[in-house]
C-alpha cells in the first residue's frame, strides 16, 4: 500500500532509472533544437540529457564556445533534480567539463514544488521517475491539479503527473520528449493521460528495444508536439485515427486494424458487472487451506474487547497520517471521555483445532489460481456471524482496509480469473463464495438471461478474447474487472451457433467438475475458438452498433484550453 512505498530504499522511493548517455544523445540528436530554444529537464539525475542538450546547442548559432556556453546556461537550459546527492554530483561534472558556468538555472528541488511560469519552454526532455513516491504534504494538492482530465482519471503515478505538469509548461507547438514506461498505452487508470495528450498534442510513441540493465519494463519514447487536438495517435510506426480509438471504452492506444471490427458492437459491460473482492488485512489470521479430505487446521481463537480510543492510534491509521480538525476534535473528546470501540484480538491456540468443512463458522473463499473452466474449492474463511471477526479486524486497521470490495456479490454465481496473469484464465464460480481481491469476478446484470453467463464464459476462454484483452485493453500483467467489461461481446455470433456454444460449455463444465483438467490448447477450447470466428463480410450492417455513443460521452475541448485551471 501507499505507506509501504514510503519505506523503500531511496532509489525506489524516487523512482530512479538512470538514462544511458548514448540513448540520451540519440534522442536529442533527432530533436529540432535551435539557437534560441528554451529546454527543461525536470528530473535530470546523472545529467545524461543535460550533457546531450548542451553539446547539441554548442553546434548551433554564432559566437565563440564561451559565448555559446553563457547563452545556454543563462537563457536556454533549465533543470530540476530532487536528489541532493545526484544534483551535487551532476553540477560538479558540468563544471568540470564546461568550466565555471552559471548553474543557477539548475535547481535542487521537487519538480512539483518548483514554481515555473506556464508555456515558457520550447522543449521538455527527460526520463521522469517511474513508480516514485509523492511528498505527503503536497500529494493531495497535486492530485487535484493533475489527477483528472475532462472527466477521466490520471493514475497518481510520478511519470504521468510529470507529463501532465510538463504539458502546462510547454509553449504552443513546443515538444515534450520523455522516456517512459509503456504502461500508459492501455491501462484504464491512464485514460485521462491518453486523452490529455491527444487533446493537447500530436503524440508519437516509439518502442525501445532495450533501455538498460536496471529494468525489464517495456519502455518507450513519447514525443508530443503541443499542437492541439490530434487526428491520429502513432504508436510503433502505426497511425490510428482518434475516431477509431474512441471505439474502445478505455481509449486504447494499442488498437490496430486487426481488432477494430470487434469493437463495432456491444461490450461485455452490457451484460455483466465485474468486481474485485476484499482485502482481509492479514490472511493468515482468517484464511484456511482445505486438505483433500475436507479437513483444515484452526490455529487461532478470536476474542472481542473494548479498545480505548486515542488520537495517536487514529492518526497512525489515517490516510497520509492526516485527520481533519473537526474529526481530530471529536476524537480528542472521545479520548478524554474514556470512550472505547469494539476490537478483536487474535490469540494463538496452544494446540490447533482440526475441523472439517462444511462447518457453520466458515465459508468458501475464492483464492486465485491458474486453472481454467473450473477449480475445486481450495480455501475457506472464518465467517462466523457473517464475518464479524474479519470485519472488526479490518475496521480497526489502516484506512485502506475499511471498504469491503464486492460485498454485495458475496455468495453469487459468476465467473472468476487471476488478477495477475499473461492470459485470461477464466473459470466458473459456483454460489456460496466470499470474494478475495486477488481473483476478480463477473456477474450477470439484472434481467439478463442466465445462459448469457455461459456464452460469455465460453468466449472468455478463447485465445482470441485473451489476445484482444492483452493487446488492446490492458497489455500489462494485471487483468482488472473493468478490463473484462471492456471486451467486445460476441455480437457477430448467430443464434444457432450461440446455442451450440452454450451446450458445449455446459458439458465442459460438468466434465471439469468431475475432475477433468482443461488447458488453453485442449481440443474443446480450439473448437470454441472456431465457433466464435467472425466472418465480417457476412454480418448485416444493421447488426453493427455505433460505439461512439458509449465512449463515456467524451467531448474534446477546444484548441489550447487549459483544463488544469
Image (cartoon, helix red, strand yellow):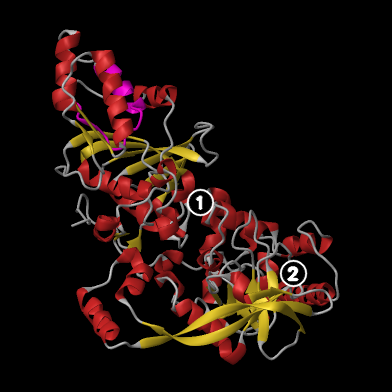
| Residue 469 in view | yes
Residue 293 position, x and y percent, is 84, 78
Residue 389 position, x and y percent, is 55, 84
Please provide the residue range marked out in magenta.
37-57
Residue labelled with disc 2: 373
**In the image, 475: left or right of 97?**
right
Q: Which of 291 and 208 is in front in this view?
A: 291
Q: Which of marks 1 and 2 is nearer the N terminus?
A: 1
Disc 2: CA contacts within 10 A as few (<14), some (14-19) or many (>=20): many
Q: In this view, does 276 lie above or below 84?
A: below
Q: Which of 6 and 372 is in front in this view?
A: 6
Q: Nearer the viewer, residue 328 or 433?
A: 328
Q: Is mark 2 on a helix, strand or loop?
A: loop
Res. 213 image quadrant: top right
Res. 87 image quadrant: top left
Q: Does the magenta-highlighted stretch encompass residue 38? A: yes
Q: Which mark is residue 255?
A: 1
Q: Which mark is residue 376?
A: none
* Quarter in which the C terminus is drawn: bottom left
Give the residue drawn at x 33%, y 42%. 202
Give the residue drawn at x 19%, y 20%. 35
Q: In this view, does 439 lie above or below 386?
A: above
Q: Does the magenta-highlighted stretch encompass residue 537? A: no
Amino acid at each position: 500500500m501507499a505507506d509501504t512505498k514510503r519505506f523503500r530504499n531511496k532509489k525506489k522511493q524516487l523512482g530512479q532509472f538512470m538514462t544511458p548517455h548514448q540513448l540520451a544523445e540519440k534522442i536529442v540528436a533527432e530533436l529540432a533544437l535551435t539557437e534560441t530554444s528554451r529546454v527543461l529537464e525536470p528530473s535530470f539525475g546523472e545529467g545524461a540529457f543535460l550533457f546531450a542538450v548542451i553539446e547539441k546547442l554548442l553546434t548551433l548559432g554564432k559566437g565563440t564556445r564561451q559565448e555559446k556556453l553563457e547563452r545556454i546556461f543563462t537563457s536556454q537550459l533549465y533543470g530540476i533534480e530532487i536528489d541532493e546527492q545526484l544534483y551535487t554530483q551532476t553540477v560538479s561534472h558540468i563544471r568540470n567539463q564546461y568550466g565555471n558556468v552559471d548553474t543557477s538555472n539548475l535547481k535542487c528541488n521537487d519538480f512539483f514544488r518548483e514554481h515555473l511560469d506556464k508555456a515558457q519552454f520550447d522543449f521538455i526532455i527527460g526520463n521522469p521517475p517511474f513508480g516514485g513516491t509523492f511528498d505527503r504534504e503536497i500529494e493531495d494538492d497535486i492530485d487535484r491539479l493533475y489527477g483528472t482530465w475532462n472527466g477521466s482519471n490520471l493514475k497518481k503515478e510520478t511519470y504521468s503527473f510529470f507529463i501532465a505538469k510538463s504539458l502546462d509548461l510547454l509553449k504552443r507547438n513546443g515538444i515534450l520528449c520523455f522516456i517512459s514506461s509503456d504502461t500508459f498505452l492501455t491501462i484504464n487508470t491512464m485514460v485521462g493521460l491518453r486523452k490529455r495528450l491527444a487533446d493537447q498534442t500530436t503524440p508519437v510513441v516509439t518502442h525501445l528495444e532495450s533501455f538498460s540493465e536496471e529494468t525489464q519494463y517495456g519502455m518507450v519514447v513519447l514525443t508530443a508536439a503541443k499542437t492541439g487536438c490530434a487526428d491520429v495517435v502513432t504508436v510503433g510506426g502505426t497511425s490510428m485515427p482518434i475516431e477509431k480509438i474512441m471505439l474502445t471504452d478505455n481509449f486504447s492506444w494499442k488498437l490496430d486494424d486487426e481488432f477494430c471490427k470487434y469493437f463495432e458492437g456491444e461490450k461485455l459491460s452490457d451484460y455483466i458487472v465485474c468486481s474485485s473482492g476484499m482485502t482481509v488485512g492479514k490472511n493468515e489470521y482468517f484464511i484456511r487451506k482445505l486438505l483433500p479430505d475436507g479437513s483444515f487446521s484452526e490455529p487461532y481463537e478470536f476474542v472481542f474487547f473494548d479498545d480505548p480510543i486515542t488520537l495517536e492510534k487514529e492518526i497512525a491509521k489515517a490516510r497520509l497520517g492526516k485527520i481533519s480538525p473537526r474529526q481530530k476534535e471529536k476524537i480528542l473528546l472521545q479520548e478524554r471521555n474514556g470512550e472505547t470501540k469494539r476490537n478483536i484480538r487474535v490469540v494463538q491456540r496452544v494446540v490447533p483445532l482440526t475441523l472439517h468443512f462444511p462447518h457453520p463458522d466458515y465459508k468458501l473463499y475464492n483464492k486465485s489460481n491458474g486453472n481454467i473452466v473450473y477449480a475445486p474449492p481450495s480455501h475457506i474463511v472464518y465467517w462466523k456471524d457473517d464475518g464479524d471477526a474479519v470485519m472488526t479486524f479490518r475496521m480497526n486497521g489502516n484506512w485502506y482496509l475499511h471498504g469491503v470490495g464486492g460485498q454485495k456479490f458475496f455468495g453469487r454465481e459468476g465467473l472468476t480469473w487471476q488478477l495477475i496473469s499473461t492470459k485470461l484464465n477464466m473459470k466458473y464460480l459456483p454460489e456460496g463464495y466470499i470474494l478475495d481481491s486477488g481473483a476478480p469476478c463477473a456477474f450477470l446484470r439484472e434481467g439478463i438471461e442466465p445462459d448469457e453467463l455461459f456464452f460469455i464464459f465460453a468466449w472468455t476462454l478463447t485465445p482470441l478474447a485473451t489476445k484482444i484483452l492483452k493487446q488492446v485493453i490492458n497489455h500489462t500483467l494485471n487483468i482488472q474487472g473493468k478490463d473484462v467489461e471492456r471486451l467486445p461481446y460476441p455480437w457477430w455470433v448467430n443464434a444457432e451457433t450461440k446455442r451450440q456454444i452454450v451446450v458445449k460449455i455446459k458439458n465442459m463444465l460438468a466434465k471439469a467438475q468431475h475432475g477433468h483438467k482443461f488447458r488453453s490448447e485442449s481440443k474443446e477450447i480450439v473448437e470454441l475458438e472456431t465457433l466464435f470466428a467472425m466472418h465480417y463480410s457476412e454480418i448485416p450492417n444493421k447488426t453493427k452498433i455505433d460505439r461512439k455513443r458509449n465512449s463515456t460521452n467524451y467531448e474534446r475541448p477546444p484548441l489550447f484550453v487549459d483544463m488544469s485551471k
